[in-house]
């Protein structure tokens, strides 16, 4: 199975900061990677797919990049609504796997 | 509007069985693969199982293989998860999720609100 490892596990940042979350796959997944945002008590929300495609309705301050085994999710200027947990997920294999999550906290 | 509504979760003893259901609306159900994803409260997401549009292919996480069975009834716009030999570690919120493709290998664009399964004696 493909393992997905996110870093950091927790990230403390301030409104207006630029932040980057990294996701590494244990083997190449081409560009078959999605990013989700989840707030406490809420359903995961799709942010990005195919590594760098922005889901409709998601603010343009979110961007994704990478291919192969290393991927990043960047928020260019943090807004109060962005403090949440972020997950990457690979769909290169029919055995989908998620990263362990990155909790983005207010500094 | 896409809607996915799960049901069937409740308190069950270890070793017993449970069947979860997910009713879909707002899209052509039989055009898409579907999945179950679970989350222990306060923990991360774990993909459980997926099924292609015509039920031709199914896949399972190692943690549930041989115990859980995914199925769908396209005539009823419904997805199911038969859970047998339940264990304490199966306790979680179970989400139904829509794949963006027919054959799987797609991202999960829509999620239900989840149904809570608690396995405890």
Image: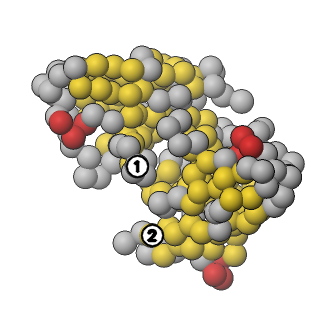
Q: Quadrant of residue B64?
A: top right
Residue B40 lies, in percent from the top left, at 58, 42
Rate crowding at label 1 as few (under 14), some (14 to 19) or many (20 or more) other CA atoms within 10 Å: few
Query: Which quarter of the image is occupied by the N terminus of chain B?
Result: bottom left
Mark 1 chain? A
Whether residue A72 is visible: no
Q: Mark 2 or mark 1, which is nearer to you?
A: 1
Residue at the image position 38 percent from the left and 28 percent from the top: A103
Residue at the image position 28 percent from the left and 19 percent from the top: A12
Whether residue A61 is visible: yes
Of A40 and B70, nearer the camera is: A40
- Compute the Cα span from label 2 to label 1: 18 Å
Looking at the image, residue A41 lies above or below residue A35: below
Question: In the drawing, what numbered circle is on residue A32?
Answer: none
Of A86 and A29, nearer the camera is: A86
Left or right, B56 with respect to A87, comes to: right
Q: Mark 1 points at which residue?
A: A41
Question: In the drawing, what numbered circle is on residue B3?
Answer: 2
Element under label 1?
loop
Residue A74 lies, in percent from the top left, at 29, 26
Element under label 2?
strand
């Amino acid at each position: 199975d493909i393992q997905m490892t996110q870093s950091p596990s927790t990230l403390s940042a301030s409104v207006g900061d630029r932040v980057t979350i990294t996701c590494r796959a244990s083997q190449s997944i081409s560009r078959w990677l999605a990013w989700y945002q989840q707030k406490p008590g809420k359903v995961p929300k799709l942010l990005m797919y195919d590594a760098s495609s922005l889901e409709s309705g998601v603010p343009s301050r979110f961007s994704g990049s990478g291919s192969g085994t290393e991927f990043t999710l960047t928020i260019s200027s943090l807004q109060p609504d962005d403090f949440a947990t972020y997950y990457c997920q690979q769909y290169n294999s029919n055995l989908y796997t998620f990263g362990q999550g990155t909790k983005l906290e207010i500094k | 509007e896409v809607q996915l509504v799960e049901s069937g979760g409740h308190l069950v003893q270890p070793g017993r069985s449970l069947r979860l259901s997910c009713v879909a609306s707002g899209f052509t159900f039989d055009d898409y693969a579907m999945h179950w994803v679970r989350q222990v409260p306060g923990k991360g997401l774990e993909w459980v199982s997926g099924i292609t549009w015509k039920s031709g292919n199914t896949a399972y996480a190692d943690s549930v293989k041989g115990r859980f069975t995914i199925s769908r009834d396209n005539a009823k716009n419904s997805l199911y998860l038969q859970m047998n030999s339940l264990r304490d570690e199966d306790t979680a919120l179970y989400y139904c999720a829509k794949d963006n493709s027919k054959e799987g290998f797609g991202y999960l664009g829509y999620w239900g609100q989840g149904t809570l399964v608690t396995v405890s004696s």
